[in-house]
Every structure is written in structure tokens, then in C-alpha cells.
Amino acid sequence: MRAVLVSPPRAGARLGERERPERPEGWARVAVQEVGVCGTDRDIAAGKYGRAPDGRTDLVLGHENVGRVVEPAESGGSAGKGELVVASVRRGCGSCRMCLGDRSDLCETGRFRERGISGLDGYWTEEYVERPEYLHRIPPGLAGVAVLLEPLTVVEKALRVAREVQSGRLPAGTTPSPLRALVAGSGAVGMLAAGALAARGASVTVVDRHPGETPAAQRIERLGAVHATADALPPVGAGPGYHLILEATGALDLPLTLGRRLAPNGVLVLTGIPPADAPAAPAELGAWARDVVLGNRLVVGSVNAAGVDFEQGIRDLAELEARWAGWLGGLITARRDLAEAPEVLSGRVDGEIKTVLRVRR
Ligand code: BGC
């Protein structure tokens, strides 16, 4: 089988060959249709992240996926032959209470593995085998956008975490005020966050580094949301602040400056992953911490996603398709062949939101 291989921590990705995996009894065999490219894949290809499976030097890259079941698992209720599925990414450590409770996204030992990222082969290949409980069935009408589900689950979890930490604070009998939300970043995660928030009726602002009527700005405006650059926002303290800020860039200065725009009781969710060799904290950290403390503001990190986030993501894909037809499909800014992966991984191109690699149609 064709497969995109990396050898972390060595930089570089290549198109190679992998043996067709054996299918253990009770597992399903899935033919990969499309896979998505994200910043994590580029970091792994640059030698900054990732780990090969134990006993191997190379790893099949890729975690954003959609495929069709070619050999179903024997168990009743699992996806049947020909059904479209998206596989989740993380597999638990098998020993902590979170992983034992089916919440490997909250693993406490750090000894989890992630397909295509750390310790387990990923999906940038022709076929994979998997336990049925990790496969999420996709309604046929969502075939063209299902490759966006995995990045959307990262958003779904972040929004759920924000809701959970904020909702415990509301006095009995009060209802949450209409949500003013700020999303930092107009890459795939930022865009999907804007879409999911707009679909929930939030008033949404998305900030990125590019002023003017860019294609990203037009996509944001189609949702009824506002596009701005961070320095075009009203000065800190001038407006009422945001109930929710979702940081989706991994740029280090942004959480500091944006965090000061939180409304009292507002929550800043960090989803972007800054580089491990990030420089020491800047001087504004003092003012930032003071605002966070004096305003009872909440700062939380969120990574990966639980099964409930996949199910919510599938509902949101359908909702976004129904409300803004074609908007999701427009986030897929290029479709290339799997063989072009090494070139695609070499860097982001202008205007890219989500590049998808075709494996099989
Ligand atoms: C993936 C997550 C994963 C995280 C950390 C992200 O790109 O979407 O599933 O948990 O990287 O490795």
C-alpha cells in the first residue's frame, strides 16, 4: 500500500510502502478516501513533534480522515460494508481512570498514543484496521465535508469545556447572556469554531493577521460574523469584553493580549499548541494574571476530543450544511493526490485553510 512515512524526530516525509495490515477478529477494515493536512502534520514532518510506533523507526503520518468500511467488524451495531466512517485519533494508556473511563482525551499519565502522531500508524495510506468503537458513522449527505470532522471535534470539545467551566457559576434561575465570542485565527480550527459558534447564535468576531476583504474575511462575513486584525479591535478595557475567547493559532503573545479582553467570568480556551522551545514569558504576564484574578476569569487548555464531541461534530456538520450551504466545502481550499504529500507538507500556501489529500474515491 502507498503510505506517507516520517521518521521522527528526523525531519522529512516521503511516499513509501507499507504492508496491508492483518485484520484482528472483531475489528473493521477501512479503505481511506480522503485525509486532511494540519499544522501538527507539518510539525511532525519538520521533526518537531511525533513518535514512531515502538520497535519501528517510521510512522505512517496523518490523523484527519474519512474512509469506507470494506470489511466490517463482526459485532452487531457496528458500521456495515460500504458505510462512510471517520476514525478518532487517540488511544488510551490503559491504566489511568480517565482512559479506563473512555476519556483518553483527558489522559493523566501522558502514555496515550495517537494515530498518525505518536506511537501508532495514521491514516495517510490506503487501508487501516480499527476497533469498531473508534469509528464514527457519517450520513451519506456529508461525504464531501466529513474530512473536516476531526478538526471540528477539537472545536466541539473546546466549546463544551468552556460551557462546563462557565455554567457552574450562574446563579440559580438565571440564563446565560447572549454569547459574545472572539476567535483568534482563521485557519481550519478558527473557521470551524466561528461556524459552530454562529450556528449557536453567538455574536462572533474572528481575528487574524490579514486586514481587508480577504477570502477568509468573506467566509467569516457569510456567517454574519465580524473579521478584524487584533490591533483593529477596540483597546483593552474599552468595550464590554468577550464571554468566550478561543485561541487557535498557537502564537504565544496572543493569549496574553487577547486574554485581557475577557469579560468578567469570561473564559479563554487555548487550543493552539505553541512550540516546545518557546521563549520565556514576556513582561505583560503580570498584568494578564492580575486581570485574570481580579475578574474571576477562566483560562483552560483543551486538546483532542471525546466520543460525544464526534457525535456533536456530525450534528454540526449537518447544521452548517443546512444553514450556509457550501460554506464548509469552501474551507477545503485544495484537493491534491496523496503522492503530493511531501510537497504539501513543506509549507502553508497563501489562503490555505484545509488541504485534503485524495487516497481513493
Ligand atoms: C489533533 C488532536 C491531537 C493533538 C495533539 C491535533 O492536531 O487534532 O487529535 O490530540 O493534535 O497531538
Image: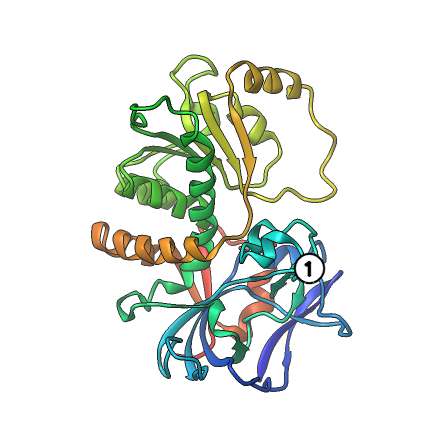
Q: At x 61% / y 44%, what residue is drawn? A: 273
Horizontal side, residue 161 vs residue 46: left or right = left
Kind of residue sitting beneath label 1? Gly
Local SS, label 1: loop
Q: Position of residue 171 (x, y in %)?
A: 37, 21
Q: At x 37% / y 41%, what residue is drawn? A: 194
Please rate how many residues cluster around mark 1, counting C-alpha atoms within 10 Å: few if below 14, some from 14 to 19, many from 20.
Answer: many
Residue with the mark numbered 1: 50
Horizontal side, residue 128 vs residue 286: left or right = left
Seen in the picture, residue 178 relative to 234 is either above or below; the reply is below
- Which quarter of the figure has residue 195? top left
Residue 134 in view, yes or no:
yes
Q: Position of residue 65 (x, y in %)?
A: 47, 67
Label 1 lies in ligand 1 vicinity (Cβ under 8 Å) = no
Image quadrant occupied by the C terminus: bottom left
Pick the front one: 226 or 189: 189
